[in-house]
Image (cartoon, helix red, strand yellow):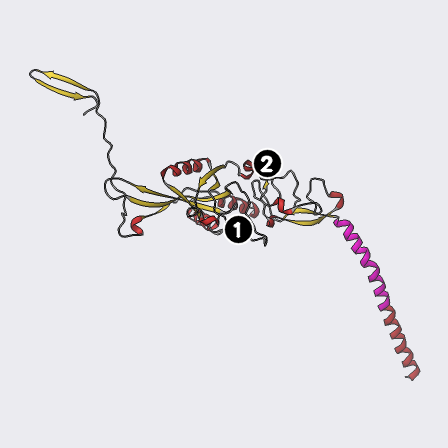
Amino acid sequence: MDKKKIILLIGALLVAAVTALLAKNMFTGASAPQAEAKKAEVMGEEVLVATRALPVGTIITPESFRFQPWPKELVEEAYFQKEGTDVESLNGTVVRNAVTAGQPLTKGSIVSPGDRGFLAAALGPGMRAVTIPVSGLTGVAGFVFPGDRVDLMLTQTVTGQGPDLKVSETVIRNVRVLATDNRVTSSTNEQGQTVARKTKLVTVEATPKIAEKISVAQTLGTLSVSLRSLADSTAELEEAIASGEIKLPKTDNPEEEAAMIKALAARPSSKKSTYSTGGEVSRFEARTPPALVKADRPDGPKVRVSRGGRTEEIEFGDK
């Protein structure tokens, strides 16, 4: 082939390649700003949305929400917009109306501490709030915070005929802490770290029957708070389901079944009470309850009866 034709062919190919490259850059540069402008127009304002499902009574924490772009034409005045929203003020508020994951939080869906009906909103359906006096020794040295789950232990001394029996018994399990003293949020320092503070009162959530038991337990001895691990409730529930103690309703919806399991795991319980006696700690203490002391019965009315030459006194009620 002639050298001139080869050179012309190579030159034509180079021109075509350069033209194609310039055309590609031109179209890419023109479409990018349009796409960015369109995206910015569609996204609109940033509003506060739930990162997970928030049932009624959920205590709001920083992990419960995030800001997310929202179509401008769908932004409502009740939404919390990024501009003008103090995120710190939302920490410790309680969900009044259920919020699904990804749904914007509205000003009417939460209630703040100090507002009317705050504690009632924090309670689950059918639950009651009970306050327990604690000290630095019985309250886990202030490391119990609102939202934690605890067990309640009753320590008492049983008296009778013989040595006294000192015993500690776990009477209530898996109750949710609503507030410590009059605070429903955790205290933090300037670095944002949670600060442990000794409290005098702990308010917990309980069923009406368990609330009665807690009230009686306070008159029997000293109540102590025992902090639970987050995994304990699920493990105990799985054990109860496997043993047949708890039967789940039949359903083909995995999400509905998971919701039922979560609800059951959050319920407090007064079953499976365990105890330890002084004899298990020290060989010089008793292991078994002492015999009860019989109360002296007061004398009843007496009647003197004479039969012939014999007289005797008969007490009413005496066999």
Camera sees residue 227:
no
Q: Which mark is residue 115?
A: 2
Quarter holding residue 302: top left
Give the prevailing secondary structure in the magenta stretch. Answer: helix
Vertical comparison of 31 with 173: above or below: below
Instruction: Please identify the quadrant where the N terminus is shown.
Output: bottom right
Left or right placement of residue 268 versus residue 255 in this view: left
User: Image quadrant for the C terminus?
Assistant: top left
Task: Mark 2 vs mark 1: give the one in front.
Answer: 1
- Residue linked to disc 1: 195
Question: In what element is the residue under mark 2?
Answer: loop
Q: Position of residue 28 (x, y in %)?
A: 82, 62
Q: Residue at x 74, y 50 (%)?
A: 43
Q: Are marks 2 and 1 in contact (CB under 8 Å)?
A: no
**Residue 79: x and y, percent?**
69, 42
Does the magenta segment cover residue 62?
A: no
- Closer to the camera in the image, 260 or 124: 124
